Image (tube, rainbow, N blue to C red):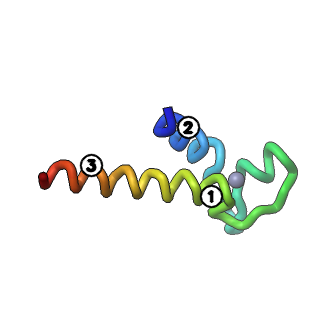
Amino acid sequence: MIERQAQQILSVHPPGVEGLCVGCRWWWARLAPYPCYQAEWACRWRARAATRHFVDGLA
Ligand SMILES: [Zn+2]
């Protein structure tokens, strides 16, 4: 399920104190500014899903 994946990505890639992604730093020793590619994708997906639910609710 993509929704589960998106939630998992968000839980693994939280924003860090210096504006860096904690997950990327922890898993790959990579200093990626937050939101990193993964977190951005998951956020976008969630926003899109929320919009879809909203529109479905109106219909
Ligand atoms: Zn990340």
Which mark is drawn over residue 47?
A: none
Left or right side of 46 for 26: right
Q: Amino acid at mark 3?
A: His
N-term-proximal mark, 2 vs 3: 2
Residue 35 is situated, as x and y percent measured from the top left of the image, at: 63, 63
* Residue positioned 60% across, 43% down in the render: 9
Residue lying farthest right?
29
In contact (CB < 8 Å): disc 2 and disc 3: no
**Label 2 CB less than 8 angstroms from ligand 1:** no
Q: Which residue is mark 1?
A: 15
Q: Which residue is mark 2?
A: 5
Count of numbered circles on the image: 3
Label 1 sits on a secondary structure element that is loop
Query: Which residue is at the front of the view, 47 or 19?
Result: 47
Give neighbour class at mark 3: few <14, some 14-19, many 20+ (Cα, 10 Å).
Answer: few
- Kindly indicate the quadrant of the structure image that contains residue 8: top right
Q: Which residue is mark 3?
A: 53
Give the alpha-carbon distance from disc 2 to disc 3, as whole Å.
18 Å
Q: Amino acid at mark 2?
A: Gln
Label 2 sits on a secondary structure element that is helix
Residue 46 is situated, as x and y percent measured from the top left of the image, at: 44, 51
* Residue positioned 72% across, 48% down in the render: 23
